Image (cartoon, rainbow, N blue to C red):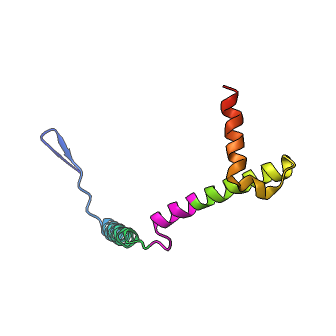
Amino acid sequence: MEYVKGQVNSQVTTDNNRPQEATHEKVRKQRYEEETTKQKSKQKRLVRIRIIPIWLRLFIIAALIAISAIAGVVIGYGVIGSGEPEDALKKSTWQHIIDLVEKQK
C-alpha cells in the first residue's frame, strides 16, 4: 500500500489472486456455454410437429359436443322423461316441443 499525494493506492499483487482469476474465467466460460446450449435448445423447440393438427382438434371437439348433446337429449327424453329414446331424434317430437313453446307466448 502506497500513499501518494493524499491518495491511497492499494494494489495487491500476490500469487493468490491468479488462481482466483483463473476460476473466474472458468465460471464465465461455463456460463457462456450454458447460455449457448439454452439458445440452441430453444431453437430446437421452435420447430414442433403436432401429431394432431389444430383444425382436426377443433373438429374433434365440435363432434364430441354434438355427440354429448344428442346423448343428453336421448337420455333426458327416454330415461328421465319416460318416453322412447328413439322418439327423441324424430322431427315430429321437436316440432311438437316447438309448438308448445310458441303457444305459451
Q: Does residue 29 appear to the left or right of 101 in the view shown?
A: left
Residue drawn at the location 87% of the way across and 49% of the way down = 82
Quadrant (top left, top right, bottom left, bottom right) of the C terminus: top right
Residue 71, percent across and down?
73, 57
Nearer to us in this view, 64 or 32: 64
- Magenta-tinted stretch: 50-62
Q: Examine the structure image and report whether residue 54 is included in the region drawn in magenta.
A: yes
Q: Is residue 53 above or below residue 95?
A: below
Residue drawn at the location 71% of the way across and 41% of the way down = 97
Q: Quadrant of residue 37?
A: bottom left
Nearer to us in this view, 29 or 71: 71
Residue drawn at the location 80% of the way across and 56% of the way down = 85
- Give the main secondary structure of the magenta stretch: helix
Q: Examine the structure image and report whether residue 60 is included in the region drawn in magenta.
A: yes
Q: Does residue 30 appear to the left or right of 3 in the view shown?
A: right
Residue 22, percent across and down?
32, 71
Residue 103, percent across and down?
69, 29
